[in-house]
Image (spheres, helix red, strand yellow):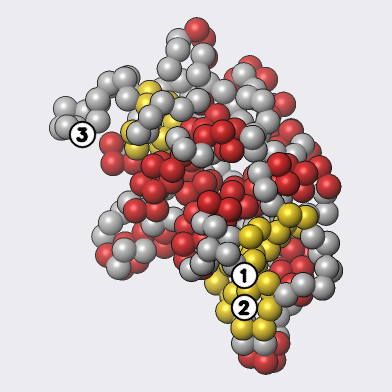
Amino acid sequence: TPALPWVPGHEGGGRIVAVGADVRDRHVGQQVAVEPNYCCFTCPPCTRGMTSGCEHRLSPGITVPGLLAERVAVPARFAWPLPAPVGAEVLACVEPFAVARSAVRRAGVAPGTDCLVVGAGSQGLLTCLSLLEAGARVFVTDPRADRVAVAERIGARPVAPDGGRAFPFVFDTAGVPAAWETSSHNVATGGTVMVIGMSSEPVGLSTMELTRRQLQVRGSLIYDHPADFAAAVAAAAGAAPRLAGLLRPGVPPDESGRAFAEARTEPGKSWIDLSDWGGDHR
């Protein structure tokens, strides 16, 4: 828990209003998405190309002050220009979209494969979208019907948590024990569970079950710089209509408390719209 006062905000972007003297490949006026995990490039995981495991990572809004501000200083290499103009709502989605796309890449899902997404919160919805874009047949389960309904709007198919189907790939986007129980119950023998959601609570899995069912269980943490985030940025403009369909209406900064409350209770991704903060258009 950070010491207060604190600047939150982990996912977002805006327009460049100034660049450093040595920056040559970014310019004022560019619309950018921020890659909010600044890796060190020198630790053992980074030198292996696994920047998601960086031992010295700085994360705006989590370990350093975040993006919920009128002006933010960002290392140039982590400010990604968009290939085409997008709405502010898309900028709010690029980072978790990269998380979802990275999990799909790491899983190695082939087109036409049946996949189950456990959890239809914002990360689950973006995982559904990423799988659909990869050509998978996507099924989704969540205790809340209103969340499942959002996933259905983009093409995911609802399934009961004990539906009796066995999926070669299951994506656990919640990480809590109940979600793990659903995931392990629905994965096929020889199948893969990709764990994206995180919880400090232990889950039940015996080595007997793991071995007899020949399961593969893999954690997928954020994404690897630069390829994963670059791919998400490149895909964001084309996916903009479907991304926008997963979001709730933007909330102005002076009502940010409502956005945080809605994130806990309402279906779809909540976000704070800073595009016209104080009349200064960005």
Q: Which residue is mark 2?
A: 191
Does residue 214 appear in this view?
yes
Residue 215 tag number:
none
Q: Callout 3: few (<14), some (14-19), or many (20+) C-alpha neighbours within 10 Å?
A: few
Marks 2/3: CA–CA distance: 44 Å
Q: Are the residues flagged by discs 2 and 1 in contact, CB closer than 8 Å?
A: yes
| Inter-mark Cα distance, 2 to 1 | 6 Å
Image depth: mark 3 or mark 1 in front: 1
Q: Using the numbered discs, state the Cα–Cα distance from disc 3 to disc 1 in whole angstroms.
A: 40 Å
Few, some or many residues within 10 Å of mark 2 (<14, 14–19, 20+): some
* Location of residue 172 in the rendering, given as x and y in whole percent from the top left corner: 66, 62
Q: Residue at x 42, y 59 (%)?
A: 52
Q: Is residue 203 in view? A: no
Left/right of residue 187 with respect to residue 59 in the rendered view = right
Which residue is disc 3 drawn over? 25
Q: Nearer the viewer, residue 21 or 157?
A: 157
Q: Examine the image and state in which quarter residue 270 appears.
A: top right
Q: Nearer the viewer, mark 2 or mark 3?
A: 2
Q: Position of residue 74 (x, y in %)?
A: 35, 34
- Name which of mark 2 and mark 3 comes first in the sequence: 3
Instruction: Say which residue appears at 64% left-offset and 66% top-offset.
Output: 114
Amino acid type indicated by mark 1: Phe
**For marks 3 and 1 on the same chain, the one whose residue lies earlier in the sequence:** 3
Q: Which residue is mark 1?
A: 169
Callout 1: helix, strand or loop? Answer: strand
